Amino acid sequence: MGEREQRNTMRWVIFSVFVGLFTLTSVLIAWATFFGRTPASVEDQSLLIKGFLIEVAAAVLALFYQLFRLQRGDVHPKNSTKGLLDSPLINIYPRSQHSEFFAKAEELMATASRITLVANGVNLLWENHLLESLMRAGRDRGARVMICMGNTHSPGVQGRMIEEQMGANHPTVHSSGIDRYARMIVERLKIDGSHENIELRLFDNYPTFATLIFDNDVFVYPYGYQVLGNASPMFHFVNDGSDEVKFFVDNANRVIKDSSPAADIIARRRNRSHFAPDWISAAVYIIPPPGQKFYELASSILGYDIWTAGTVAANAKVKQLRRYVGEAVDYGTHATLADSLLFSSEGQIERIRADLKHLAEQYPRFQLNRLSVVQSPQDPRAVIIRAGDDSGVMEALHHELVSRVYSLAVSSSFLSGRTTKKIPIEDVRSQLMLERYGSPFILNAMMPHFTLLSRGPTDPQLMARLIETVADLFMDGYLEPIDVTEIALVIKKPYEPHWSILETYTLCGPRGGD
């Protein structure tokens, strides 16, 4: 019998007991009034009967009001507290890792057709017999099982795990333990062949509370500040369609929607060149405004206008340079703030959009100056326009993005081998930056520049003449300082040849000293 059925049965038991007692009382009063040794007068009998009937009517109405007020919106004022029998909350366990809750969860696993577990570590999975019950539910009964755990490499989840280390009781299962459980489940799904019914995903957001759903039974426990999740109280609700329960269910669905398949994340950690075709490429660029002399000439050399996402015909001056452009055409005219990174979900892109909007409100406009045509010190086959940033704003923005955006990415064009730019293999620093952030040319190695040609000649003399040719084109006012008033989030969708602008953000922060 379900929790809702039990409560309905309780209502009828209370009602039956009440009616029985009133019937007995009525009989006794009638006997005393009419058939006792000293019967009451007619006037007294009339008064007693009227008073008794009024009392019975009032009591019955009160009983029905308390037991059968099913239309909550009609009887409960907006700010009133609902009666216990009408509340979707049906039980509270003193902590989430409680034996009675585990027993209840195992009981529900045996019958539920849909199971959704959203939690940082999903402590149910730490118990082998519960994990086996969950696997049997999907493999043998065909139950739809969704497990969504924290991605321990994401900044949001790491923030939660750091807070747990600040408390009096430290977690027994650390990030490495959560990763180990995730790998184990992925391997089990491959072996059991139950991956069609059981799915494991990883979320990136800071977790606020865990939600465990077995059909209409919803369990929720909060993540308190500096308190372990397994020490939190567990609240058991029945999904009665109320707004209160819908709030928790909808939150779990949002977390799942923005999460990523665990198999892809784990494959990338095992093999840094792993690539999934549905990953989204994104970067943050400084793009000169359309119509500016520098931008128009650079785009004509490249053959692509990123503002219009259209090709640019080659005139006689730049036609001879097109064979040296290489992959630079795909990116358009830009200076990089954040490299080409790969993201595993649309939710990560939305987080970056919100982050860039926040950053743009904190940093002021600035200028790129001292522009010059040179051979790239990072790629001997590339011809670039190198620039300076006396304000420090570009440097500061880049460092912010390394912390906020690079650490959120699942991979990069460097790691996945989707760029022709050479990686300094023997440089220890570059390898550390590549492994940690997905790019060797970041932080102190970040160099403001615009790439014009990425496939120049290997012969030094031919390269020197090529640089002279390009420098001649940019004479006569083409290398004036560039006012940077906005930054752009650019993306490259799967199977599309070029990058395009997703959104721009106007820099409107206070200047230094303001």
Image (cartoon, helix red, strand yellow):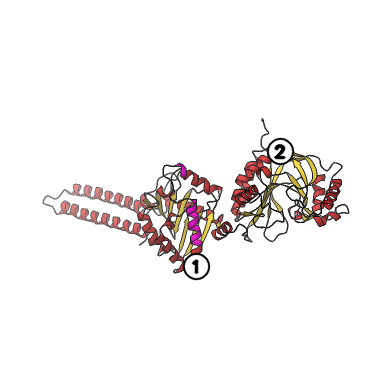
Per the picture, the main secondary structure of the magenta-coloured stretch is helix
The residue stretch that appears in magenta = 165-186
Q: Which residue is mark 1?
A: 191
- From the viewer's perspective, is 229 left or right of 467? left
Quarter assignment of residue 122? bottom left
| Badge 2 vs badge 1, beta-carbon distance below 8 Å | no
Residue farthest front in this picture: 426
Question: For this rendering, which residue is in front, 257 or 376?
Answer: 376
Residue at x 46%, y 44% (from the top left corner): 165
- From the viewer's perspective, is 384 left or right of 430? right
Helix, strand or loop at label 1? It is helix
The spot of residue 51 in percent (x, y) is 25, 47
- Mark 2 / mark 1, whichever is N-terminal: 1
Callout 1: few (<14), some (14-19), or many (20+) C-alpha neighbours within 10 Å?
few
The spot of residue 192 in percent (x, y) is 48, 68
Q: Is residue 54 visible?
A: yes
Residue at x 42%, y 42% (from the top left corner): 168
Instruction: Tell me the kind of residue under disc 2.
Output: Arg
Residue 478 tag number: none
Q: Which residue is mark 2?
A: 365
The spot of residue 511 in percent (x, y) is 68, 33
Instruction: Tell me the kind of residue under disc 1.
Output: Ile
For marks 2 and 1, give the one nearer the viewer: 1
